[in-house]
Amino acid sequence: MPRSPIRRALMAILALSLPFAGSCRADVVRLKNGATIVADTLEERGDDLLIHQAQGTIVVPRSEVASIERAPAAAPGRPGAPGPPGGGGPSGPATSPDAAPDGSAPGAAAPPRIPSREEILKRIDELDRRIRDYPMARAENGKQIVSLLNLLGMQALQGRNDDEALQRFLQALGYDPHNARSQLGLSATYVAQGQDVQARATLELAVLEHPEDADLRTLLGDVYDSQERPEDALAAWKKAYALKPTPALQRRIDKLEREHGIDAGYRQSEAAHFTLKYDGERAGPDLDAGITAYLEEQFTGLVTRFEYYPRQPIVVIVYPKRQFYEATLAESNVAGLFDGKIRVPIGGLQQLNGEARKVLLHELTHAFVAGKSHGTAPRWLQEGLAQQAEGKATSTVAGLALARQYEALSEKEGWGQGFSYESALSFVEFLIEREGFPHLVDVLEAMGTGATIEDAFQRVTRYSLRELRDAWGQALAAKYLK
């Protein structure tokens, strides 16, 4: 399914009150959907805001930010500045010879700090001892433990450590079976693992217990949408919007209403690994059987090729051409797309032909690449692999044009960072020839467990992406210009 639901759930979990918030200097980012994120440092990059934390970096569109509260600068030794969690920090004036007259450090403020995993675990142990020693204080100490376990679960989920996230949220629910944030985190973890049935069961119960929680209803709508239950998804999202209206949620509602207005009357059939929706009035009588048979055949090969097995059925929607572009708002040259569901404009066919097979295989490859990388594969890698899977090869004309582009650059460092379908295919072909396809699968797996694209290539191939791009450019020049 699309990664956006998981990201929204993470944003909500990040809004948890941090137990150490009073002892850390940090900037606070307030989102339009009501969530709050505590940042070590902030960085603006184009239309995005990069929120750096000790556990990693969160990228949030600037359009989703309501406000930013900058924390006042404070040196570690400044009067009133907190020490480490648990006390013991200095309380007198700063003694640094470079300190300003008011005790603050000149220039930049002291680096803000988020409590480490070790600190959180230590605090949980302390609270557990308090519960054993002072049973009368169990309720309050239990609340703090739940909050800390939710924070650990969020950090694990953000780092794509789904097993630990599952453990932490289940632990939290052991202390408080009705905690809405724990239920939300557990459901988001199930979604990340591709276990939509468990996510749906957890969310449906949680919504009964917390009918006014917009985040629970939003994620429940996402799960309904991934299971191709558009009426239920719209009902959940609209209730969430009534509780907490946000532009992002309104866009999702508008998108699904537009799509459902077109495919509401489509027939639906189930196969072993696919849910197929199609316009039965216009398609040939055997088109649905031909599509599912072809997809099932390709599914087996892609499972072996990418060493990845999707846990949930993949939704495939087959539109007549005009309705495809009305539903997706895609450009006229788009032959198909994958947005968590495969959408293709081949619904007017009477039988499956060679071109339609290529489109279906291209989009099915996107589903496998997205699943293997947990939705983190960059566009060039997605499109290069998908084109290669459908049997495309770089033409002499395209290769010559790319070689000339490389040779024309006086500075080669920026080579290959822009996107085109031709360059994506050519670079992936080069990587497969040089490193072997299994190495690209390893790169996708590394990204799926939290590595950046640069770190993944460095780890797997021992070369940086810049070095690999430069080697690709040299290979193009040698092949086409020498």
Image (cartoon, helix red, strand yellow):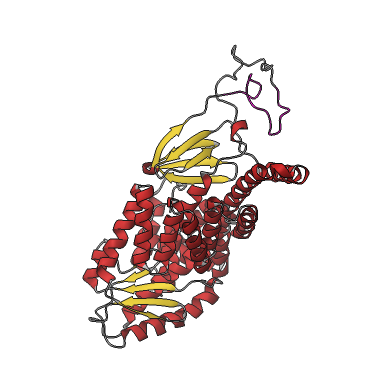
Above or below — where is 169 with respect to 46? below
In the foreground, 175 or 13: 175
Q: What residue is at 67 percent from the left and 43 percent from the top?
A: 141
Q: Main secondary structure of the magenta part?
A: loop
Q: Is residue 101 left or right of residue 482?
A: right
Q: Is residue 421 magenta?
A: no
In reply to whether residue 75 is colored magenta, the answer given is yes
Q: Is residue 181 left or right of residue 355?
A: right
Q: Quadrant of the C terminus?
A: bottom left
Q: Nearer the viewer, residue 83 or 40?
A: 83
The spot of residue 180 in percent (x, y) is 53, 52
Taking the view exactly as shown, the residue that stands out farthest to the right is 133
Which quarter of the rendering shows the N terminus? Answer: bottom left
The answer to which of 466 and 54 lies nearer the viewer is 54
- Whether residue 393 is visible to the viewer of this picture, yes or no, is no
In this orientation, does residue 29 appear?
A: yes
Q: Residue furthest bottom?
A: 286
Residue at (47%, 81%) from the top-left corner? 272
Q: In the image, what residue occupies the spot 33% across and 48% down? A: 247
The percent coordinates of residue 318 (x first, y second) are 31, 75
Residue 130 pos. (x, y %): 74, 42
Magenta span covers which residues? 74-90
Residue at far top of view: 101
Q: Quadrant of residue 354?
A: bottom left
Q: Is residue 268 above or below residue 476?
A: below
